[in-house]
Amino acid sequence: MRLRARGDAGQAFPIYITVVGGLLLLALAYFAVGQAAATRSEAQTAADAAALAAALETRDRLTDQWITHVLEPDSWQDIFDGETPVPNGCWRADALAARNDASVDCELDGPLRYTVVAETNDSVGDTIVPGTEDRKATQTATAVIEARCWFEPLAEDADDGALPSLSCKGGEDWDLDSDDLSDLPRPEDLFDVHLADS
C-alpha cells in the first residue's frame, strides 16, 4: 500500500507542474492585458485633456471678442455662434499633450468643436503577447463649446447706447449698462465647454 501511495504522489507531480505553469501563463496574459488597458487609458486621458484645452482657449478668445464688441449688440450672435474669427486653439492641445507624454493631431472640425487624436509616446512594452513592444495606444476625444446665454434684439425705438439683457442657463440674467461695464460675464458664464458623448 505504501509503495502504491508513493507511485500516486509521483504521478501527481507532473500534473501539479502543468497546472502551476498554466496559471503562471494566465497571470502573464492578464498582466499584458492590464498593461495595454493602462496605456489606452493614458492615451484617452491625454486626448480628453488636449481637446478640452483647445476648446477652453477658443472659449476665452470668444469672450474677449464679446467684451471688445459689447457695445455692438448686432455682433453678439455671431460671437455666440463661433462665427467671428479667433485664433485656433490647437496649440494648447499640443502643449498639454506634451506634458502628458503624448502627441496629438488636433482639428477644428466646426466653429465650436475640436477633435483630437492622441498617441502615447511610450509603447505597451514587452509582454508575452507578440508585437506589443512597439505598439502605442491611440485614442480620440471631441470637445464642444456651447453658448450658455441668449438675448432678445433691442426694439427699434430703444435708447441710444441701450444694451440687451443676457439670459443664461442656470437662471442667471445680466442687465448690462453701457455707462458701467465693470461687471461683465466671465468666460464660464458665457460658454460651456464639455466633451462630446462618444
Image: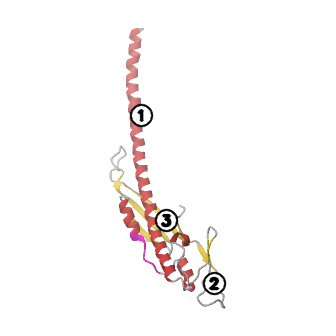
Q: Which mark is residue 153?
A: 2
Amino acid type, label 2: Pro
Question: How far separated are the C-alphas under marks 1 and 2?
Answer: 72 Å
The residue located at (61%, 82%) in the rendering is: 164
Q: Which mark is residue 142?
A: 3
Would you say the residues marked 1 and 2 are in contact, meaning their CB atoms lie under 8 Å apart? no
Would you say the residues marked 3 and 2 are in contact, meaning their CB atoms lie under 8 Å apart? no
Amino acid type, label 1: Leu
Question: How far separated are the C-alphas under marks 3 and 2?
Answer: 32 Å
Considering only vertical position in the picture, is 121 above or below 9? below
Left or right of residue 198, residue 26 in this image:
left
Query: Where does the image place residue 90, in percent across and percent down from the top left?
Result: 41, 70
Q: Do we see residue 102 in this rendering?
A: no
Q: Secondary structure at mark 2?
A: loop
Q: Earlier in the sequence, mark 1 or mark 2?
A: 1
Left or right of residue 111, residue 31 in this image:
left
Q: Earlier in the sequence, mark 3 or mark 2?
A: 3
Which of label 1 and label 3 is nearer to you? Answer: 3
Q: Which residues are magenta?
A: 85-91
Using a 10 Å C-alpha cutoff, classify the residue at mark 2 as few (fewer than 14 neighbours), some (14 to 19) or many (20 or more): few
Amino acid type, label 3: Thr
> In front here: 74 or 41?
74
Q: Which mark is residue 23?
A: 1
Q: How is the image coloured?
A: secondary structure
Is 152 within the magenta?
A: no
Is 88 within the magenta?
A: yes
Query: Where does the image place residue 20, in percent across and percent down from the top left?
Result: 39, 30
Q: Do we see residue 123 in this rendering?
A: yes
Q: Secondary structure at mark 1?
A: helix
Q: Earlier in the sequence, mark 1 or mark 3?
A: 1
> In front here: 161 or 73?
161
Give the quadrant of the N terminus. top left
